[in-house]
Amino acid sequence: MFGKKTNNNISSPEESMLKGVKWHASLSAILLILLGGVLLFQPQIVSGICRLIGSLLCLAGVVEIAIYFISDVRKNYGNNKLIIGIGLIVAGVFVLVAYKLIMHIVPLILGIFIIVDGVIKLQTAFNAAKVNDVNHKPIMAIAILTIIAGVLIVAFYSHIINLALRIVGLVMIFSGVTDFVNILYVGKKISDYIKDMEKLVK
């Protein structure tokens, strides 16, 4: 009876944590694939997104300033909506005026993001190796390829912006798909490891 209670205490938190990790990783992979698809097939849409973001920032700034003047400052002495509103408008105007510059650095930012994603995959490969998984090498190879792709994008993005955006999109789709593979593969290995630990406790 004591053994059974200990088993529940061990398995439940770990299984819950594993489900949470799978959920967040799956959501991240879906977002990667969707954003990658947009960049691959419609790279020019980035300029429209920049204008939309700039307009929304300006609108939010105007709303914040309006709320500041409408509200009673005596009842809310710490009201800083005026500063927030001005800051949002400045940020919005900057995005609207300098959207071409922003488009220029988007591949750089996404390239850095891809490198980080590759490093996370590399950590997954190391974790798989720690549990003596002989198949950790394919995960490591994918991680290294992802990092190399990110480094190449960061190094050459300024020469070919549109092509760089398409390449970023392709790499993001690849990264998202391989994330799903990692989720299924590593998740199964961790589940098997938890079951083995349960048998030892019993």
Image (cartoon, grey):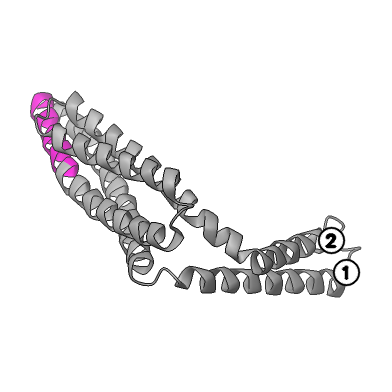
Q: What secondary structure is found at the residue carrying circle 2?
A: loop
Instruction: Tell me residue 20's x, y (percent).
Output: 31, 48
Tell me if 117 is positioned left or right of 72 in this view. Answer: left
Instruction: Tell me residue 157's x, y (percent).
Output: 44, 51
Tell me if 79 is positioned left or right of 147 in this view. Answer: right
* Foreground residue among 37 and 9: 37
Q: Which residue is mark 1?
A: 72
For the point 34% across and 57% down, which residue is it? Answer: 167
Residue 132, quarter of the rendered image: top left
Which residue of the protein is positioned furthest toward the right in this rendering?
Answer: 74
Which disc, if any, is residue 76? 2
Q: Main secondary structure of the magenta part?
A: helix
Q: In the picture shown, does residue 92 fall above or below 28?
A: below
Q: In the picture shown, does residue 57 fall above or below 152?
A: below
Q: Residues within 10 Å of mark 1 (few under 14, many from 20)?
A: few
Residue 29 visible within the image = no
Which residue of the protein is positioned furthest toward the front in this rendering?
Answer: 159
